[in-house]
Image (cartoon, rainbow, N blue to C red):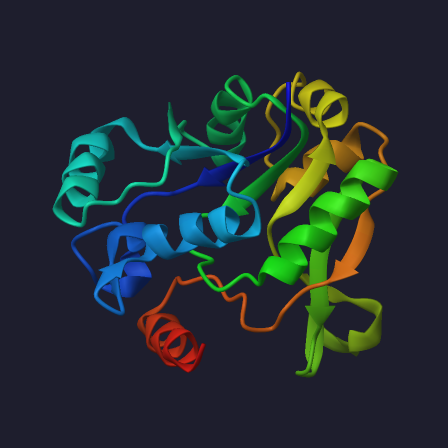
Amino acid sequence: MIERSVIISAGGIGKRMGAAIPKQFLNLVNRPVLFHTIEKFYQFDPEIQIIVVLPANQLDYWKALCAKHEFGIEYAIAKGGKERFFSVKNGLALAKGNVIGVHDAVRPLVSTEVIANCFSRAKEHGAAIPVFDISESIRKLDANGSKAVDRNSYKMVQTPQCFQRDIIKKAYSVDFSKEFTDDASVVEKNGTFIHLIEGNEANIKITRPIDLRMAETLLQGE
């Protein structure tokens, strides 16, 4: 068994991007977003097992992109499911690491420090996820409209979300529920405490055209 695995999970075509191709394949500084994401984990640990989860109808396109750009990092492929839950579950079937991380394919700017901290804390405590502070005022919707709430009581959640192998495998043995919004919510439902680490603010999820422009600026700055 190897020390670490990461499941990099991708979704379908992003309607908010206004693009005809999936977000993970969009050009970011002349190369697909997903290349940058994979490279972040390879830079952290060249021995890490990388599992890319893609919808079945995107596999040929992805292979063509890899050939075109001569992308040489080794990875395994798992087919995506109808929901993120099933995509991750398919990736878990291939994961061999003692600690397993799950990361959004369209978060190419995660720092290697955050990756390292997530894996380290998960190895020590069982489960760890990166978060960062909310800088805007927020309001909670209720039957009467909305009301202001204390933003200091909330955190924005990022990926990778990392877990000891036995913990995440057991958590994903349950039936799917709509309340599962991320991997931490699945694991937490099974009774595991989730440890929080400080994320990096640049670790944005590319879902809108402005996110792609921001990512280009940040990546060029690196």
Residue 66: which quarter of the image?
A: top left
**Residue under the point 35% across and 51% down:** 34
Q: Position of residue 8 (x, y in %)?
A: 47, 40
Instruction: Give the left or right position of residue 35, taking residue 94 as reference.
Output: left
Q: Tell me if I can see residue 143 in this picture.
A: no
Q: Position of residue 190 (x, y in %)?
A: 80, 27
**Residue under the point 78% across and 32% down:** 189
Position above or below: 28 against 88 = below
Seen from the viewer's position, the closer of residues 85 and 149 is 85
Q: Position of residue 47 (x, y in %)?
A: 54, 36
Position above or below: 11 against 206 = above
Position above or below: 66 against 156 = above
Instruction: Give the left or right position of residue 29, taking residue 210 as reference.
Output: left
Q: Tell me if I can see residue 16 in this picture.
A: yes
As drawn, which residue projects farthest toward the front? 46
Quarter occupied by the C terminus: bottom left
Quarter occupied by the N terminus: top right
Seen from the viewer's position, the closer of residues 193 and 120 is 120
Position above or below: 166 against 131 = above
Seen from the viewer's position, the closer of residues 209 and 203 is 203
Instruction: Give the left or right position of residue 126, taking residue 217 as reference.
Output: right
- State how many labels appear: 0
Instruction: Give the left or right position of residue 39, taking residue 63 as reference.
Output: right
Residue 58: which quarter of the image?
A: top left
**Residue under the point 71% across and 50% down:** 118
Q: Position of residue 36 (x, y in %)?
A: 38, 57
Seen from the viewer's position, the closer of residues 45 and 106 is 45
